[in-house]
């Protein structure tokens, strides 16, 4: 018996499989099966209190004629583009700053890390108060400094809510970009800059000809991580605007969540499958861009 | 010379704006948490008070401490399980030869890009069928699965940095896989294990969508969801209480980030720079 067991374990592929089996089982049961389940569900009319019925692409067809869905899709894309650009810009600036040998650099590093580490739901409530029309910090600051003559209706207007979301999201995620970009910056040897200074290069020339080429692969990685993350944005919207005013800031995740909440599992699944396909096609681009398959060998 | 002075001024201004940008919301949160809420609505002078904190901690209907306990316990157990399971996987991936290694790594990486909402609906149904909605177990399993990809990548990176000669020597001495793991890899890769544990903990403590969908009351609801849904009973939003609760939640996480900043940063940059 013992010998048989030992022989089985020493067969190629058995031991690695045993070591990986808990991981594969958990990811299989709680991620792969649910995704497949969502695809199957999306083909059914699956609404609470109604008998299940196979409707093929019926859920998808009714989505595309639903103005709420197209609005959510357009908002999600627009939000992703604007917020990712903002975060990348702020993040690169923060990274350049963190890379300087400044006094108090350790403090700055912690200050940058904290917004990233705090739950969005918690910092989102703080932003909600900051944006409050009557007594929030944003309006009292703008009025007291004379930058504005009348208070801005941050969360009550479409443009205000959009800006408010982008700022709160950039605040939370620019630190992540900064940390990734900083790692790239630290691979540049100081001598390169010193040599360039001797050759008479200015700050901006050094940035364009030395810094940018070295950090561009890292920037691509941060960019794609952030894009995929922004596509599935949910928390900050749930807390700050709830998708309002008038559904103008509902993301696809939010839209799907509301479908689930109303008991429409078929429709919610269809939205989440569409979002899934968007994220997966982007991550395929990411895999190609980063040439990870090469790095693995 | 002028360029140097210009750079110095730019850096100084940048430093100050960066600190203000990152910390202003927290300063504001602390300020509101320590003043009487009434002064927020009127123009009167803000008076210092600890009332908000007392409300949050003592308020029996708020269950704030229960939510905090739920969050900490769920995140602790899940990250412990995650690190063990990901550690076994990382050992296989870095120390064993098998055909489908690349497929496993790429598959796991691909999984980490799935939008949470695309699995949340179905997991909800699974948990409902098993009677696990609104329980710790109902969050721990999905959280663990969700955090596995990142932990596997972090741990695989650290395990690779352990010289293979070390475990070859152990093998010659007759050590099996588990012994190599416990006595060779574990001590050397300990910083990586701490990093994976910390990042998993922070991710799970911060998680929102699953906790929102799979819990319904203080039996399992976590702090982020509780704070997000925290509205007053009497119409007016109790901002003082909310900010006190937010501050009490922020403090431990901020302390963790400050103490382990190097570990967290190295964990986040794993893989991105390769």
Image: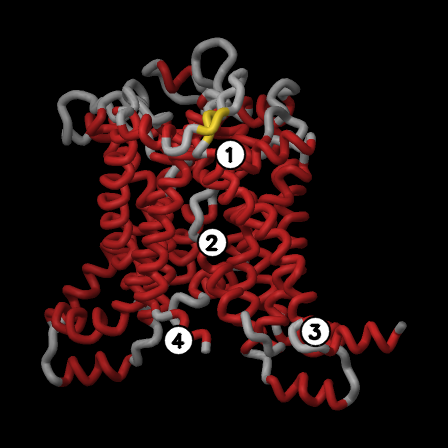
Query: Mark 1 packing: few (<14 Cα in 10 Å), some, or many (20+)?
Result: many
Q: Work out how far the residue at label 3 is from the one at label 1, CA to CA, in angstroms.
A: 38 Å
Q: Quadrant of the C terminus of chain B?
A: bottom left
Residue B53 in the image: above or below residue B72: above
Q: Which residue is mark 1?
A: B121
Query: Which label is found at residue A294?
Result: 4
Closer to the eye: label 3 or 1: 1
The residue tagged with tag 1: helix, strand or loop? helix
Q: Residues within 10 Å of mark 4 (few under 14, many from 20)?
A: few
- Quadrant of the image for the N terminus of chain B? bottom left
Foreground tag (2 vs 1):
1
Report whether mark 2 lies on the same chain as mark 1: yes
Q: Is residue B22 visible?
A: no
Disc 2 crowd rating (10 Å Cα; few below 14, some 14-19, many 20+) is: some
Residue at 61%, 57% (x, y): give it.
A24
> Disc 3 designates what residue?
B181
């Amino acid at each position: 018996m013992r010998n048989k067991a030992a022989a089985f374990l020493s067969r190629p592929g058995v031991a690695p499989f045993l070591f990986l089996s808990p991981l594969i089982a958990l990811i299989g049961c709680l991620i792969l099966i649910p995704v497949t389940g969502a695809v199957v569900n999306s083909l059914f009319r699956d609404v609470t209190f109604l008998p299940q019925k196979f409707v093929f692409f019926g859920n998808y067809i009714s989505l595309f004629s639903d103005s709420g869905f197209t609005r959510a899709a357009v908002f999600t894309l627009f939000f992703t583009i604007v917020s990712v650009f903002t975060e990348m810009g702020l993040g690169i600036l923060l990274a350049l700053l963190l890379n300087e040998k400044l006094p108090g650099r350790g403090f700055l590093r912690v200050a940058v890390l904290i917004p990233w580490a705090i739950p969005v739901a918690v910092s989102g409530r703080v932003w909600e108060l900051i944006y409050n029309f009557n007594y929030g910090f944003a309006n009292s600051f703008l009025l007291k400094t004379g930058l504005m003559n009348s208070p801005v209706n941050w969360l009550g207007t479409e443009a205000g809510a959009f800006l408010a979301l982008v700022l709160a999201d950039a605040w939370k995620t620019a630190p992540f970009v900064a940390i990734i970009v900083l790692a790239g910056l630290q691979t540049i040897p100081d001598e390169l800059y010193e040599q360039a200074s001797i050759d008479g290069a200015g700050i901006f020339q050094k940035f364009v000809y030395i810094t940018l080429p070295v950090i561009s692969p890292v920037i691509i990685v941060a960019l794609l991580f952030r894009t995929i993350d922004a596509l599935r944005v949910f928390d900050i919207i749930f807390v700050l605007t709830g998708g309002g005013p008038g559904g103008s800031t509902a993301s696809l995740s939010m839209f799907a969540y509301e479908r689930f909440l109303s008991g429409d599992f078929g429709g919610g699944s269809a939205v989440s499958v569409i979002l899934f396909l968007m994220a997966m096609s982007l991550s395929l681009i990411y895999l190609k861009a980063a040439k990870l398959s090469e790095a693995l060998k | 010379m002028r360029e140097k002075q210009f750079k110095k001024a730019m850096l100084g201004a940048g430093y100050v704006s960066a600190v203000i940008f990152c910390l202003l919301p927290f300063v504001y949160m602390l300020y509101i948490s320590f003043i009487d809420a009434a002064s927020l609505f009127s123009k009167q002078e803000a008076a210092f008070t600890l009332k908000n904190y007392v409300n949050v901690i003592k308020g029996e209907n708020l269950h704030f401490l229960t939510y905090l306990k739920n969050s900490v316990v769920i995140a602790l157990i899940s990250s412990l399980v995650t690190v063990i399971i990901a550690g076994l996987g990382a050992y296989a991936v870095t120390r064993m030869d098998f055909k489908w290694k690349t497929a496993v790594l790429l598959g796991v990486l691909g999984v980490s890009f799935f939008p949470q909402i695309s699995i949340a609906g179905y997991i909800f149904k699974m948990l409902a069928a098993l009677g696990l909605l609104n329980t710790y177990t109902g969050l721990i399993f999905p959280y663990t699965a969700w955090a596995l990809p990142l932990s596997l990548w972090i741990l695989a990176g650290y395990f690779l940095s352990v010289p293979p000669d070390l475990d070859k020597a152990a093998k010659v001495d007759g050590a099996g896989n588990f012994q190599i793991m416990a006595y060779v890899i574990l001590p050397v890769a300990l910083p990586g294990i701490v990093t994976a544990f910390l990042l998993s903990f922070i991710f799970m403590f911060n998680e929102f969508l699953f906790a929102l969908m799979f819990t319904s009351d203080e039996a399992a609801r976590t702090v982020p969801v509780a704070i997000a849904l925290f509205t007053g009973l009497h119409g007016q939003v109790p901002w003082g209480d909310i900010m006190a609760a937010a501050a009490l939640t922020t403090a431990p996480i901020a302390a963790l980030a400050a103490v382990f900043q190097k570990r967290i940063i190295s964990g986040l940059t794993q893989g991105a720079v390769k």
